[in-house]
Image (cartoon, grey):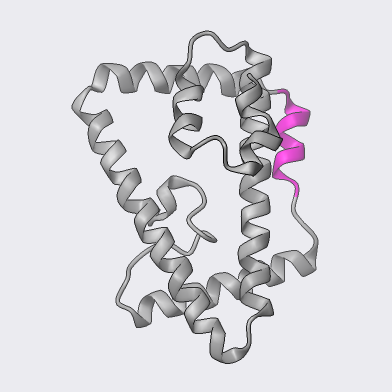
Amino acid sequence: PEEFSIEAMRSGETTREQFREAFRRDDLTDEQRRELRNNTRQLRRERMEEQLAEYFDASDEEKVAVLDRQIDEMQEQRRQWEARRAEREANPQDEEQRREGRRQRGRSQTREQRKTRSESPSPESSARRATYRAALRSRMAERGIQGGGRGGGQGRGGGSR
């Protein structure tokens, strides 16, 4: 669907909730689901790069404020994720259907697709992310916040594993 094109997603015309609902739609083909997943992954990577750039471009004095704002965003995303999880747990039958759908879609990926997704970034990029994550975890600890540090709230609700 056009509303889930990478351009529409970048422009902010499509909300996170609309993304989640799209994944649950029955009328999408496997190819459309794959495209939606790929677009979502691409946007997550772009968002991570923006967060890294914001952090590393900031002066030493500004870095704490940047981390605090990013942590606050992560905490809000985590609260939203936990609320959605509670809703899902209230209806275990729907959750089992979603799990089965994810298993089926995972099986449809080729070995090459999984390999491409899992290949490591450059050593410089890995070092940059590790430095950022360490600073993020350190700041969270200073604020008394547990968990997180997955790089801007990406995956698993932006919270602890």
Question: What residue sits 35% from the left and 44% below the top?
Answer: 81
**Where, by quadrant of the figure, is residue 146 drawn?**
bottom left
Q: Percent from the top left, x then y, of residue 137?
A: 46, 73
- Tell me: residue 4, above or below residue 53: above
In the image, 13 versus 67, the foreground residue is 13
Image position, residue 61 (x, y; %): 55, 91
In the image, residue 92 above or below residue 124: above
Determine the residue positioned at 70% across, 43% down.
118
Above or below for 142 versus 91: below
* Residue 55 coordinates in the image, percent (x, y): 61, 75
> What segment is highlighted magenta in the picture?
110-119
The one nearer the camera, 53 or 114, is 53
Relative depth, front residue between 142 and 58: 58
As drawn, is 68 to the left or to the right of 31?
Answer: left
Residue toward you, 7 or 23: 7
Q: Quadrant of residue 140?
A: bottom left
Answer left or right for 120 relative to 37.
right
Q: Main secondary structure of the magenta part?
A: helix
Count up the numbered dots: 0
Q: What residue is shown at x 50% (from left), y 24% (from top)?
A: 23
Residue 67 at x, y percent in the picture: 49, 75
Of all residues, the one furthest to the top in this rendering is: 27
Magenta segment includes 24: no
Left or right for 91, reference 7: left
